[in-house]
Image (spheres, grey):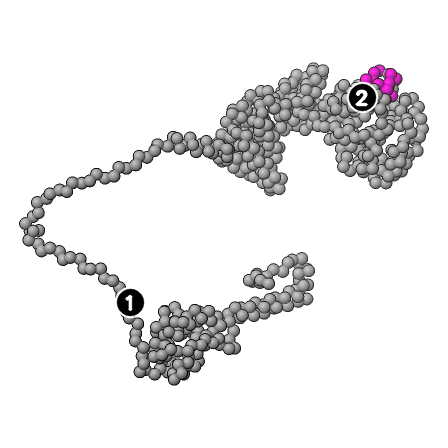
Amino acid sequence: MTYLVLARKWRPQTFDQIRGQSHIVRALKNAIAGGRIAHAYIFTGTRGVGKTSAARVFAKALNCQEGPTPAPCNHCEACLSIAEGRHPDVLEIDGASNNSVDDIRRLRDIVRYAPSQGKYRIYIIDEVHMLSGGAFNALLKTLEEPPPHVVFIFATTDPHKVPVTILSRCQQFDFKRLTSKELSGLLGDICHSEAIEIDDKSLMAIAREAEGSVRDSQSLLDQVISYAGQKVTYQDVMDVLGVVDRELLFSVARDITGHNGAGVLERLGEAEEFGFDVKRFALDLQDLFRDLAVLRTSRESVNLVDLTAEEIAEVRDILDKCSWEELHALFDMISAGLEKLRSASRPGVVFEMTLLKMTRMPSLINLSEIPQRAAALAARTPQVAACPPPAAVAPSVAVTPRAEIARPPAPAPAAQEVAVEPPPPEPQKDVVHTSETLWAEILKRLGPLSSATFREHAKIVHWDAGKRALAIEVEPDHRPTAENAEEELGRIASELSGGKVSLSLTVASGSESTADRKRRETDLERKNWQEAISSPVVRKVQALLGGEIQNRAENYKK
């Protein structure tokens, strides 16, 4: 007899044999028992979680000789023929290979015929999302108003690819992934029935590798049994599936939380000897820190983690010495490292540096604990006593040598000299200044900064000694300086000429200020730049190279 793989041999034949989908099983049973059978259903979920198996069991329940019944007998001709795929009224269609409009039209033509043996004509369309748009449109009218003896059951892994017009005409049931513990229990029952000797640790490793898929877990178990025979060890599972040794994973986690970088490098060296997959190791480490954070939140959350009771006891030391915040920070760091691994040319080096960075993470302090820690530190710090004032020293009587007595006393310190400003010079009444001599004298009496400014940027343009009228011309940029010194200039000129001088300040005509000059130069450079980038030659080169013109010069402000 031809060997039947475990995935086919252990396919569910009744609703009670469907694992991990109790919400769907209950709904379908109640619908059958209450006579509320819809004309169209759509089963969604990832691969290998029981969508097609549930559709077949549902077809049995509707066409069983004792039915419709929530518990098909599996002994009548209808149940046996449906299980073997030869029942004339239960048609399974592959939507990936029968996805054209003509295929759906042929289906629509035969829908109106009454069932030949059973009570319902049942059409199971697998991977229904692969139908073309025209095929979906051809199915719409029949799906909305089918004959009373027809039931459509669609199965898909991508419900978002199914038009909403189809979804709205169906009752949708979402199949979920099974947890590792559920898969481990299922595989344990299979091994017990098949007389296979295997430990719980190996079953959990196979279940983790299946990632929630029942069919994948059964296929992996079949593969391991083919390699190891009737007695399966954990080493056999690692050899066949290439999974990471859990002991090595926990050792790396301990070295990270213990800030032992050398230990991490040593563990990675051991893993490389077995040719481990870097990305898979990183994923397993991420899952481990997630499980540790969940357990650190609540020790009663054992049902939410993929750890056995032995493994939880094994990592208890990590839970005791790490806070939730530290575990979460480590989880974030390994997640960031995974993002870098996806695009790294040398993932091993990136992963190694990520783990070393995790070992160097300092201990975290909760912000709410800072006041208490500060108070405790202040209580432990000894108070420094204030130094007492120095005691008064009694004057000591010393015998003065004779030579010092004969020495003449030191002269008394001179009185502190008080600096007195010299009186201002008297007005020069008898001196008649020309414009040159007057300007030279004014510059002498000005401060050094003002004198340098006026010497370079100002001059006398008119001087009438008889009327004492003085006109000084300054450059536009230095007009504010001249206006601030206007009073002082008038005072000095009056002292030099022997009478009050009428002073007027003028701005040099025809000269350009520095700001105006810079503005004019900027406008000219901007104009030249616009002309350059508007050149047809430049535009042609830009189009050929697909580049962008950038001005490396000073940015212009509008």
Q: Position of residue 51 (x, y in %)?
A: 77, 27
**Front residue (pair 463, 152):** 463
Residue drawn at the location 68% of the way across and 66% of the way down: 536
Residue under label 1: 421
Residue 367: in magenta span = no
Pointers 1 and 2 in contact (C-beta within 8 Å): no
- CA distance separating discs 1 and 2: 114 Å
**Side of 239 where 468 appears, left or right:** left
Q: Residue furthest bottom?
A: 466
Predominant SS along the magenta part: loop
Depth check: give the residue in front, 370 or 100.
370
Secondary element at tag 2: helix
Q: Is residue 48 visible?
A: no
**Rendered position, 197 above or below 397:** above
Residue at point 13%, 56% (across, down): 410
Secondary structure under the numbered disc 1 in the rendered image? loop
Residue at figure coordinates x 66%, y 58% from the top left: 545
Mark 1 vs mark 2, foreground winner is 1
Whether residue 64 appears in magenta in the rendering, the answer is yes
- Find the magenta span and give its range: 58-75
Position of residue 341 measured from the top left corner of the image (x, y, whole percent): 60, 39
Q: Earlier in the sequence, mark 1 or mark 2?
A: 2
Q: Which residue is mark 2?
A: 30
**Amino acid residing under circle 1:** Glu
